[in-house]
């Protein structure tokens, strides 16, 4: 209660923004994930890995736009690419050189992606990949996993997306090869595709067990179904994406977030014979979108992948994240507190639970009040992590900021968690 009182008292401008904007936007914004009670902070400005809110407070940015912000807020290479693109005209109502260049880069970086198409969001990328699978196989059913999140209309967690997408979904438990085997034995010939995150992101950074991904590959192949790996969040977690790290070659892959250099972005791609469905010379499927090849995204994405987030940089950032997670977990264990940090590489989530976390159901008993306390404690220390305990590293986040975060966790363990 004291933390909340301080929060309310010290953020009058954010409060006013919230009250005013709520007259025009339900909940005062366009992204449900950004809301928390009593009112969320309104951000005014960002630079590198630092944010300032409208009341003038400074925060180390440990959300980094839910992984899309790997470059931080002001990378000169991205700005320059955007400016150059705009000087040549905003969008050109035609094929443009930049989309070809970015497509080539993506195909070279993610070897399972033989052909790629761009969208404006990860949500659209997943919808198009599903569409391709339905058409390619002539089947109707899509297997997804409980807690899976594939976009605003494709959520399978405790709070389902409001839209009922007109597909025939079968929702199975995550990391459970046995249930998967049973489902395929029962109805394998009706399954068009399995759509899976190689680490459940929105449901708390729960990594897939290697054996689970392997089982997905084997079962889909046996049944003539497609494996779609949603790497919208995870492609940054290893030099060539998380599926490649596991030695898995999906039929289709969806991408998004940072790959557009911080601009609106999504992509889907994979086997040449499947993607040929979208070839207007021969294929039956149309795929449109006014801004799919917009020059700003195409330019920013190319600059980001070639000049900043190279495969080597991806590996290095992942290693920093892994080291941080191990240090945090060691501190929690030492303090004897039921707090753990799960995840892969530069993306992690704090959970007030002991014991192994294999699926979101393992978190049902967690006390949400502790999560909230942790969030407001970090905010009060100038650390901007997400209300659900999501913590993300970006390239400009320096060792001092990471040390401040670790100190804030240490204080939390000392003060609150006993
Ligand atoms: N898939 C995954 C795994 C995601 O994490 C997200 C976004 O958080 C999406 C899809 C949807 O992407 P977008 O928000 O760009 O529509």
Image: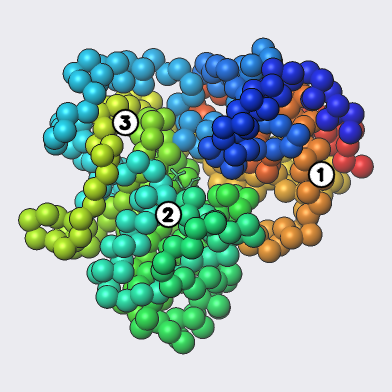
Q: Which residue is mark 2?
A: 230
> Is 315 on the left-hand or right-hand side of 375?
left
Residue depicted at 55% across the width and 21% down the height: 49
Residue 88 location (% of width, % of height):
19, 18
Circle nearer the N terminus (2, 1)? 2
Residue depicted at 79% across the width and 30% down the height: 377
Q: CA distance from mark 1 to mark 3?
A: 39 Å
Estimate how packed mark 1 is, as few (under 14), some (14 to 19) or many (20 or more) residues with alpha carbons within 10 Å: some
Which image quadrant for residue 134? bottom left
- SS label for mark 3: helix
Residue 382 location (% of width, % of height):
71, 22
> Is 367 on the left-hand or right-hand side of 418?
left
Residue depicted at 70% across the width and 38% down the height: 36
Q: Is residue 195 visible?
A: yes
Which quadrant does the N terminus fall into?
top right
Q: Which residue is mark 3?
A: 297
- SS label for mark 2: strand
Q: Which residue is mark 1?
A: 370
Residue depicted at 64% across the width and 16% down the height: 54
Residue most toward the bottom?
A: 186
- SS label for mark 1: helix
Residue 20 drawn above or below residue 129: above
Image marks 1 and 3: residues in contact by CB distance under 8 Å: no
Which quadrant does the C terminus fall into?
top right
Circle nearer the N terminus (2, 3)? 2
Determine whether the beta carbon of the residue marked 1 sits less than 8 angstroms from the nearest atom of ligand 1: no
Estimate how packed mark 2 is, as few (under 14), some (14 to 19) or many (20 or more) residues with alpha carbons within 10 Å: many
Residue 231 drawn above or below residue 301: below
């Amino acid at each position: 209660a004291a933390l909340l009182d301080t929060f309310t008292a010290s953020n009058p401008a954010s409060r006013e923004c919230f009250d005013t904007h709520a007259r025009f936007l339900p909940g005062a914004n366009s992204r449900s994930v950004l809301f928390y009670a009593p009112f969320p902070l309104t951000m005014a400005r960002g630079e590198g890995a630092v944010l300032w809110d409208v009341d003038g407070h400074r925060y180390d940015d440990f959300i980094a736009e839910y992984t899309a912000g790997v470059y931080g807020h002001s990378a000169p290479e991205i700005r320059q690419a955007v400016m150059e693109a705009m000087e040549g005209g905003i969008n050109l109502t035609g094929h443009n050189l930049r989309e070809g260049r970015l497509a080539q880069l993506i195909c070279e970086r993610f070897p399972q992606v033989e052909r790629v198409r761009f969208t404006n969001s990860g949500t659209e990328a997943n919808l198009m990949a599903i569409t391709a699978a339905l058409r390619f196989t002539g089947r109707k059913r899509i297997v997804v996993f409980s807690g899976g999140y594939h976009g605003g209309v494709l959520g399978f967690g405790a709070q389902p997306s409001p839209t009922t997408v007109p597909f025939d979904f079968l929702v199975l438990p995550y990391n459970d090869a046995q249930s998967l085997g049973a489902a395929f034995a029962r109805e394998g010939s009706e399954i068009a595709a399995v759509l899976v995150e190689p680490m459940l992101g929105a449901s708390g950074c729960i990594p897939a067990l290697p054996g689970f991904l392997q089982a997905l590959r084997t079962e889909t192949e046996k049944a003539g179904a497609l494996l779609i790996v949603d790497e919208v969040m995870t492609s940054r977690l290893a030099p060539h994406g998380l599926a490649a790290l596991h030695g898995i070659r999906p039929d289709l892959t969806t991408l998004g977030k940072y790959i557009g250099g911080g601009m609106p972005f999504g992509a889907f791609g994979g086997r040449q014979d499947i993607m040929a469905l979208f070839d207007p010379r021969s294929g039956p499927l149309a795929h449109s979108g006014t801004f799919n090849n917009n020059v700003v995204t195409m330019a920013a994405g190319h600059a980001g992948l070639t000049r900043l987030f190279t495969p080597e940089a991806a590996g290095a950032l992942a290693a920093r994240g892994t080291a941080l997670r191990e240090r945090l977990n060691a501190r929690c264990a030492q303090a004897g507190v039921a707090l753990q940090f799960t995840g892969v590489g530069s993306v992690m989530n704090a959970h007030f639970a002991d014991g192994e976390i294999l699926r979101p159901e393992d978190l049902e008993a967690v006390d949400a009040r502790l999560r909230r306390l942790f969030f407001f404690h970090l905010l009060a220390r100038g650390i901007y992590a997400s209300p659900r305990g999501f913590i993300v590293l970006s390239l400009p986040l320096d060792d001092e900021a990471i040390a401040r975060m670790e100190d804030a966790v240490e204080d939390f363990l000392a003060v609150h968690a006993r």
